[in-house]
Image (cartoon, grey):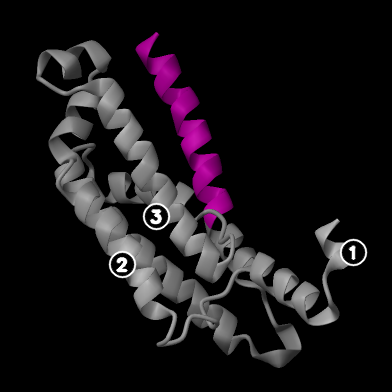
Amino acid sequence: MLELAAGETALRGFVLWGMGSFARVGMEELPWLVVPIAVGLSWSAVQAKPLNALLLGERYASSLGVEVVSFRRKAILITGLLAGACTAFCGPIAFIGLATPHVARALMRSADHRHVLPASMLLGAGLSLACDLVVRTSGPAMSLPLNAVTAFLGVPVVIWVILSGRRWARMSA
């Protein structure tokens, strides 16, 4: 319905937004993007201990003093803030948030969030910029959308996670 009511310029903007791009974030939009990202990442950075406790289960985390229900609500709110801010400005960029933590965990050879969270933040930023560089250097003849490049990197990671999860399940049984 929105597509029918929208003008040509608005429709073109919506289609381009849907492909994902960092190009439309200029200096005037940057403060509106940086503030929610800084809040979300700051909160996330100090939550390594409760996250580590939750790796061992809700009962264990609760016995260590983590208010599980409250913590989950806050984590969902912060995750929504981070995802919403990025999506509002850059469009729905697929697979970076899904694949990056798994790659960071594998690179760090640890599930400890004190190491995985900063590694995920740096790796996610690096992968995002590398994908954007591929898009910008692809030239007008090829003109790749950012979502296509991130999917090219992210799909193999997701398949790897699924297959290694099955192998882990077979080993633990």
Residue 122 appears in view: no
Residue farthest to the left? 64
Instruction: Say which label, 1 or 3, has the lower sequence index.
Output: 1
Query: Can residue 74 be seen in the rendering of this structure?
Result: yes
Question: What is the magenta segment's predominant secondary structure?
Answer: helix
Nearest to the eye among marks 2 and 3: give it: 2
Q: How crowded is mark 3: few (under 14 residues within 10 Å), some or many (20 or more)?
A: some
Q: The residue under label 3 is which amino acid type?
A: Leu
Q: Say which of 161 and 10 sits in front.
A: 10
Q: Position of residue 70 (x, y in %)?
A: 27, 27
Q: Which residue in the structure is indicated by mark 1?
A: 4
| Quarter location, residue 152 | bottom right
Give the amino acid at mark 1.
Answer: Leu
Q: Is mark 2 on a helix, strand or loop?
A: helix
Q: Which residue type carries mark 2? A: Val
Instruction: Identify which residue is drawn at 57% across, 56% down.
Output: 94
Tell me residue 34's x, y (percent). Answer: 33, 70
CA gap, disc 1 to disc 3?
30 Å
- Please indicate whether residue 18 sits to the left or right of residue 39 in the image: right
Q: Counting other residues with Cα less than 10 Å from the Cα at mark 2, is it few (<14), some (14-19), or many (20 or more)?
A: few
Q: Which of 165 and 21 is in front in this view?
A: 21
Q: What secondary structure is marked by label 3?
A: helix
Q: Mark 2 points at which residue?
A: 35
- Which tag, 1 or 2, sits closer to the chain's start? 1
Secondary element at tag 1: helix
Query: Which portion, as a residue range, is magenta?
Result: 154-173
Q: Read off the residue under disc 3.
A: 82
Residue shown at 66% from the left, 73% from the top: 145
Task: Give left or right: position of 66 versus 26.
Answer: left
Camera-near label (1 vs 3) is 1
